[in-house]
Image: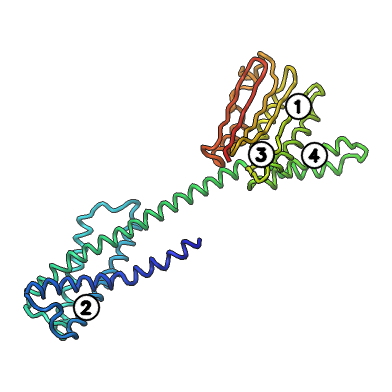
């Protein structure tokens, strides 16, 4: 923001003094052509006449600039792209220069503000000098408007992308934000008999998991926070499954200063609990390797277990809405910065997620 506020006055200053500079340059080029080609002294004659001519030249440039800027603004505001009828555009500019320049010169001469010594010849010289210079000036103004239009378009496109990103993330977050369930659990908690401590503890655990999903999903969290959540989630999942289930976890301890968007590992762990069979064993690990975080989860499966659709359980990573949403979130939050792959073996299904922070 500081850069934008610093650069804006410079742009305004250039727009304010640009016509004056162009008027001075044009007048001096005219003087070079008319004085030096006649072997007269440069800026010969009375200083009042030359000062008047200089002021009139600057005034013409300001009038032309005001008219052309408004015209270009309307021209580009109506078009979805850069106008292509260049010949018509410059023909209009040529006509405008002629009908503005010559009456001003004629009136100024009649009022005695300037001196046109050679009459018609001097009119031709003024037009021959000013018309090309003013058309060149129009080209500069036109390029300025084009650049601004393209910049505004890029900003608009980026804003649309950002809005879409926010909408997509909000849509995905809504699937992780079961407010109604969170409130319902609180109601059920107070309806459970106080003597049923196991049920109350389970409700407390589930409430804490949902609280994390609801209130800690918008921004990055520390790896320690995410690991605490995963630990609680694993403990809660273990309560509802058979005592035969064995879960091994290895979350490492080198997480200081690292942050990550939350709930990226939970769908993979959920998948493991959902499809674990056979030896009922799950292995979960989270390691740091330089700037990369490597998450691995594997679960035992039966060698020929298939789901209702005839697809082997523990199949492709992209199956299931939870994993599809995970991939969408990764694409939005870590584009080109992650690898997600799975491997199906006869009695083991494993998934690996690598994120470059």
The residue carrying mark 1 is 247
Instruction: Give the image quarter of residue 349.
Output: top right
Marks 3 and 2 sit apart, C-alpha to C-alpha, by 70 Å
| Secondary element at image label 4 | helix
Look at the numbered discs 2 and 4 and tell me whether their residues touch, using CB distance below 8 Å.
Answer: no
Residue, x 65% and y 17% (percent of image)?
Answer: 306
Q: Secondary structure at mark 2?
A: helix
The answer to whether 62 appears left or right of 243 in the picture is: left
Mark before the other along the chain sequence, 3 or 4 = 4
Q: Earlier in the sequence, mark 3 or mark 1?
A: 1
In percent of the image, x 44 and y 53: which residue is there?
155
Name which residue lies at 74% across and 45% down: 211
Which mark's residue is nearer the viewer, 3 or 1? 1
Query: Which numbered tag is attached to residue 54?
Result: 2
Residue hosting label 4 = 205
Circles 3 and 4, Cβ within 8 Å, touching? The answer is no
Q: CA distance from mark 3 to mark 1?
A: 19 Å
């Amino acid at each position: 923001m500081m850069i934008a506020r610093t650069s804006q006055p410079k742009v305004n200053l250039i727009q304010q003094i640009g016509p004056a500079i162009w008027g001075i340059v044009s007048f001096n080029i005219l003087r070079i052509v008319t004085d030096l080609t006649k072997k007269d002294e440069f800026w010969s004659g009375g200083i009042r006449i030359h000062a008047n001519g200089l002021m009139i030249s600057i005034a013409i440039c300001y009038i032309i600039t005001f008219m052309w800027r408004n015209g270009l603004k309307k021209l580009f505001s109506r078009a979805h792209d850069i106008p292509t009828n260049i010949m018509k555009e410059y023909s209009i500019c040529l006509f405008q220069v002629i009908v503005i320049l010559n009456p001003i010169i004629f009136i100024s001469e009649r009022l005695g503000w300037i001196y046109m010594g050679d009459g018609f010849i001097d009119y031709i010289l003024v037009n021959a000098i000013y018309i090309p210079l003013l058309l060149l000036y129009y080209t500069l103004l036109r390029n300025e408007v084009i650049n601004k239009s393209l910049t505004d378009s890029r900003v608009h496109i980026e804003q649309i992308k950002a809005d879409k990103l926010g909408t997509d993330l909000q849509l995905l977050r809504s699937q992780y934000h079961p407010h109604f369930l969170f409130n319902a659990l609180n109601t059920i908690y107070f309806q459970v008999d106080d003597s049923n401590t196991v049920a109350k503890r389970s409700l407390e655990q589930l409430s804490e998991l949902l609280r994390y999903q609801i209130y800690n999903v918008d921004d990055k969290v520390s790896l320690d926070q995410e690991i605490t959540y995963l630990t609680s989630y694993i403990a809660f999942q273990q309560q509802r499954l058979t005592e035969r289930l064995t879960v091994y976890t290895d979350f490492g301890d080198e997480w200081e200063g690292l942050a990550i968007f939350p709930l990226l590992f939970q769908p993979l762990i959920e998948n493991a609990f959902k499809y674990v069979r056979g030896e009922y064993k799950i292995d979960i690990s989270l390691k740091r390797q330089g700037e990369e975080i490597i998450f691995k989860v594997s679960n035992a499966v039966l060698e020929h277990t298939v789901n209702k659709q005839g697809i082997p359980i523990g199949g492709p990573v992209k199956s299931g809405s939870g994993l599809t949403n995970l991939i969408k979130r990764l694409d939005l939050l870590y584009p080109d910065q992650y690898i997600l792959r799975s491997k199906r073996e006869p009695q083991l299904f494993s998934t690996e997620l690598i994120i470059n922070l």
